[in-house]
Image (cartoon, rainbow, N blue to C red):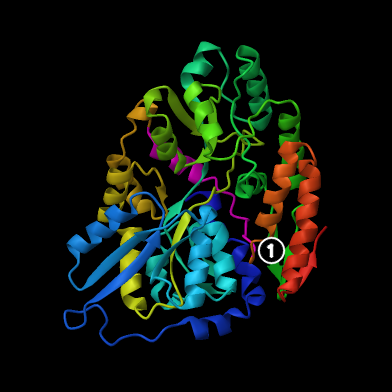
Amino acid sequence: MSRSWSRPLRTAVGAAAAFVSLAVIAACGGAAQAPAEGTRAHPVTVTFWAWTKGSQQVADEFNATHDTIKVKFEEIPSGGLGGYPKIANAVKAGIAPDVLSIEYPSLAQFVSQGSLQDISRYMTPAVKKQFLPQTVQLTTMGGRNWAVPSDASPQIFYYRKDFFTQHHIALPKTWAEFRTAAEEVKKAAPDTRIATFFPDDPTFFQTMAWQAGASWFTTKNGAWRVDTTDPATRKVATYWQGLIDAHLISTAPSYSPEWTASLKAGTTVGYLGASWGAGTLAGIVPEEKGKWAAMRMPSWDAAHPSVGMSQGSTFAVSKNSKKTAAAMTFILWMATSKDSVRARVSASTSTALPAAPALVPVARKAIDTSFYGGQDLYGLYEKAGATIDPDWLWGPTAAANNTLRDQLHGVVGGSTTLPRAITTTQSATVAALRKSGLKVEDAS
């Protein structure tokens, strides 16, 4: 077992104190159970909202193989494009579905709002052992389990191998080498950039800080400690500000027409993404089949590589659900069943790395990697996953994300800089958490 997978996470150390109010949330969030739920005498239908690729096919596969529990699936916009407000409004109205797809960065916010049920009694030691320890810890708060991990999402660098080969540009293993490669890309083709810094996605920068060893949120003695300006984050901010100032990197919004057009035109020859990004990229530029490859994300120390996790999804039960047992049957099947993985990957070109390691061989067999020249993507993902830095905890509100997103627009517009942006994020996050009634320690 790798060092990072076996190492205890900071998430579990002080979270119980900081989430002391969750005992009340759990008490009001647990819905009454129907007797003998999901049996031939009492069949049930579970509702499920998600935006992840292949979810409809997964629900169809479950329905085809289960008689007493059926799933009614509804596709919603991704969280950042309206899915989360839709979920929040449905919870407030008491009409939320039984099963929700929630990304790791947003899970703590839904927990702190009392939108989810405590599912600890279903997450037995035997169940937990089926998942990567990091993903279990990221779904554990206050000593309670609030979601089931779906996938892990280590950072990955995708690149146009034909361009790099044609211009004899060495593949960057470190961030110092990445800047050199960025300079060589621009020199070889002045209108072309090595990759994109996404100004509309704060988790892009946060994950880079995570990789460098930052810890924006920790808990101790019942208080949240906030530090978005630690040395690791400052190093990352200075580095990326340098790339932006030198015009060595694109700053198109993520998945925007501008970004997509640059990929199709060959003026962006790299994508700083995650394991799930391989399928996304192949779907955007299918005509470039065979021209792309994947490698580990550049790191700060080539001898000790590490990565953060970019997004990644979990499955949770809404507090409105009165079918918790049936919902958990479906959720655990989705997260641990070989049939579920085959349905998702085969039908949707999803390249997500399952959070359950036993399912990786199934995903590897099911995925078509011809876009990447037949490269063993899952072998790469497993190696990258083994270096996920475990010392990261997402905050209990969206304050840091919202503030940083606003600041990033100013960074690419020239009205501020990344070093100033993280300082502004620090003060705004501390103020927002205190306003919400949480005890906060300002580490700046």
Residue at 51% in and 28% down: 261
Judging depth in this view, the residue of 109 and 127 nearest the camera is 109
Left or right? Give the position of 54 relative to 260: left
Characterize the local packing of mark 1: few (<14), some (14-19) or many (20 or more) Cα atoms within 10 angstroms.
many
Horizontal and vertical percent position of residue 227? 75, 57
Secondary structure type for disc 1: strand
Residue 365 left/right relative to 320? left
Span colored in magenta: 376-395
Q: Is residue 390 above or below residue 232?
A: below
Q: Is residue 405 shown above or below 45?
A: above
The three-letter code of the residue at mark 1 reads Thr
Between 217 and 349, the residue placed more toward the observer is 349
412 or 371: which is nearer to us?
Answer: 412
41 over 366 or under it: above or below: below
Q: On the image, numbered disc 1 is attached to which residue?
A: 218
Percent of width and height locating residue 31: 42, 83
Q: Which residue occupies 80% across, 51% down? A: 423
In the foreground, 415 or 384:
415
Point out residue 241 in the picture as x, y percentages from the top left corner. 75, 35
**Is residue 80 found left or right of 403 in the rendered image?**
left
Q: Is 390 within the magenta?
A: yes
Decide if residue 296 is in sight here. Answer: no
Where, quadrant-wise, is the C terminus in this rendering?
Answer: bottom right
Question: Is residue 284 in the magenta section?
Answer: no
Residue at x-position 49% and y-position 81%:
29
The image shows a total of numbered marks equal to 1
Is residue 225 among what the camera can see? yes
Q: x, y percentage for residue 323?
A: 34, 78
Question: Could you say which quadrant of the image residue 187 lies in?
Answer: top right
Residue 61 placement: quadrant: bottom left
